[in-house]
Amino acid sequence: MISRFLAFSILLFSLCISNAISQPADSIKINPELLNNHWKASWITHPSESVLDYGVFHFRKSFDLKSIPSSFIIHISADNRYRLFVNGKAVSFGPSRGDLAHWFYETINIAPYLKSGNNLLAAEVWNFGESKPWAQFSIKTALIVQGNSPAEEIINTNSSWKVIKNGAYSSASASAKETAGQFVVVGPCDRVEGVKYPWGWETLGFDAANWKSAKTIDVGHPRGVGTDINWVLTPRRIPMMEQTWQRLSTVRRTTGGAVPEGFIHGKEKWVIPANTKMTVLFDQGNLTTGYPELLTSNGNGSQVKMTYSESLFDANGQKGNRNEIEGKTIVGYSDFFLPDGGDNRLFRPLWFRTWRYLQFEIETKDKPLTINDFKSEFTAYPLQEKAVFESDNENLKKIWNVGWRTARLCANETYYDCPYYEQLQYVGDTRIQSFISLYVAGDDRLIRNALSDYKESIIYEGLTQSRYPSANTQIIPPFSLYWVDMVHDYWTLRDDPQFVKGFMGGIDQVLGWFNARIDPKTGMLGKVEYWNFVDWAIEWPWISESRVGGVPDGGSVDGNSSILTMQFAYAVQRAAELNEYFGNTYEAAKYKQLAQNLTEAVYKNCWNEQRGYLADTPAKKSYSMHAQIFGVLTNTIPEISQKALVTKFIDDKTLIQPTMYFRFYLTQALKKTGLADRYLQTLGLWETMLQNGLTTFAENPDPSRSDCHAWSASPNYDFLATVAGIRPATPGFRSVQMEPALGSLKFIKGQMPHPLGLIRFDLKKSGSDGIEGFVELPDQLAGTFVWKGKSVTLKGKAAIKF
């Protein structure tokens, strides 16, 4: 009762604070009646099974058509999730993740899958119950389907739909031992007993005479309609996910038998004899995300256990080189399939899996088992690699490729911190991921969705949640500041002022929360509640008792952290720019003065003249590179002294060092001080990961929990923004500045997507300090090329020679 009350309270609060306008993910026009009035379709569920506990349900609706229509548009959603079939063909999967106040639905044209005569809509709907992912909100098991017009309302969900609970499914939640004690909140794996499965349930020929009539719950509610609010139906804001078939790369180890050579290529069946126990370790060749599909025949009484892992572990729990398997075992979560002996039985998990290594543990009884095929359907947000970066350093190409794979696997229906462990959209990660999406793919849809998600997460105190959507609230105050920075980032890179303007109220809320926590004695931030994560520096470890880590001195009990105060100033400076742009002169002046007060207070209280560094607190007991970085970015350090300071601290190992995550901000400091040529010298951590066989970039330097963390993919942005030096010269990217920093490179060549087209470049060093080549801008875009303090105007295809 308490949990339902809290969920309803959160829903009502989210409704009150959110006024973002949601856009359909495609060009299909939604009937305005469905945006402004109750739907005629009802949410439906099973009439007698629990609607709160774990369960997998199948719904069916048959209907007749005299002829094949040219268009048949429907809208569909479910709680927790659904997979829709039309005449046996899978056509839609969703809903995309949101919260109760933004419960998304997909709009699809199913006409290509229809035929004259009898047709069937079939939906698989599941509720993971208490084991649901932390990113998943839920009220109860339910499905809704609504026709777009009266002609399509024949398929509206109501009591004419039939439903059955699939008793073959049970939850296969991993134990702490199976996941090496790590934090895993992506939902359970599946255990499927073939003898209980209603094979063919999604096809027209299946006999559903014993299925029950669905129970109606309530009609569909779009935003702002009616008094009884449950799921607030909202058009999907993003495109559908990519689906591409992929196959395993190699067999790395077997015990108890052999795998036919052609099996992994789909050219040969694999027969496991009766009364056999066999273990096979497969290698995908690189980390991936996808839906495994196991197709079997015969083998009644057998079991196939499939364990997924990013890497293998040695006896000491260390990963070491990811390519090496000797003396290592697999640790990870597992699916279980128990074939019933029938032909062509397909196992496919309800939710995608993440793996490089996949281990099969097979046990047969008195019947042999035939595995007809195994492949997987890769899935991720459909980012397209439109950017190109080439140079004379082949190692940079490897970093680019691994970074791009990292960014891709960490982007799905939201950005993910990591695809294996959490699948949660954290602001600190998302800011870096957004730059990669814009610079490499030119795609802003997932960024727009993320910005709206965070606005919709704002709690009553005025802070955004650190990750959202998430049914488990977490607050990291610095991440609220990064959301402000993200809005500013988007404003510089996209000419979309009305969208940006919609976040100004939320920005004021966030900054107002911090403003109320300024210590009047020091002028710095005093005690700041919640989890003030900055970076996973070695000196800032996870503390089990307080359940926080990555927190610098002054970030917890005592307050007066120079880093947090400067992060606050950094966001305030950007808020001032936004307000000035929108003509809010009073607010702009107020924020400028606040930023000045904060930076002056930090310098006054934390600058150590003897050491020549900013301390982490006024006590001056600890010193981090993080404080120096933000001292530069906020002009806390006088501009005249910044270049010398960066030159001094960049190689100073006595300072607390940043991990891959925070080196994104180190690079910004290099650029700001004219030291961008040193950027390539900071890539040692990435080169080490390549040497250790990682195929995606990890959360931290080893020992690392996650082998795939997109905040470590920042080189894909910086190769274009720092090495090629491409950046907006005016808000909205209406003009461009290009100031390359080749460092030790002899040439760079490539392209980058801009809203107006591709920016192309081909540049090489000439002489001791010259450069030549060309830069080509899209039509209607102008800019400036800068080299060693000299500049030339860019328009069309411009020859460069300095």
Image (cartoon, helix red, strand yellow):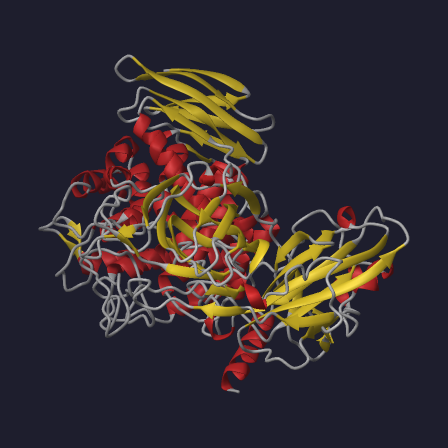
Which residue occupies the foreground of this view, 12 or 541?
Answer: 541
Number of marks: 0
Q: Hey, which quadrant is residue 154 in on the image? A: bottom right
x%, y% of residue 749?
Answer: 42, 22
Tell me if residue 26 comes above or below residue 424 in the rendering. Answer: above
Residue at the image position 75 percent from the left and 49 percent from the top: 113
Question: Would you place residue 288 above or below residue 237 in this image?
Answer: above
Extreme residue in the top direction: 767
Viewer-proximal residue, 146 or 388?
146
Task: Indicate the position of residue 283 as horizontal and vertical percent values.
Answer: 37, 43
- Examine the image and state in which quarter residue 151 appears: bottom right
Residue located farthest toward the bottom when viewing the structure as drawn:
1
Is 90 situated left or right of 771 in this image? right
Q: Position of residue 556 (x, y in %)?
A: 25, 70
Report the side of 740 relative to 194 (left or right).
left
Q: What quarter of the picture does the C terminus occupy?
A: top left
Is residue 208 visible to the viewer in this orientation of the structure?
yes
Q: Nearer the viewer, residue 20 or 297?
A: 297
Front residue (pair 118, 340): 340
Seen as rendered, the residue at the extreme left is 610
Q: Residue at x 62, y 80 (%)?
A: 49
Question: Which residue of the protein is positioned furthest toward the right in this rendering?
Answer: 66
Residue 410 coordinates in the image, percent (x, y): 44, 50
Residue 574 visible, this angle: no
- Answer above or below: position of 392 versus 642: above
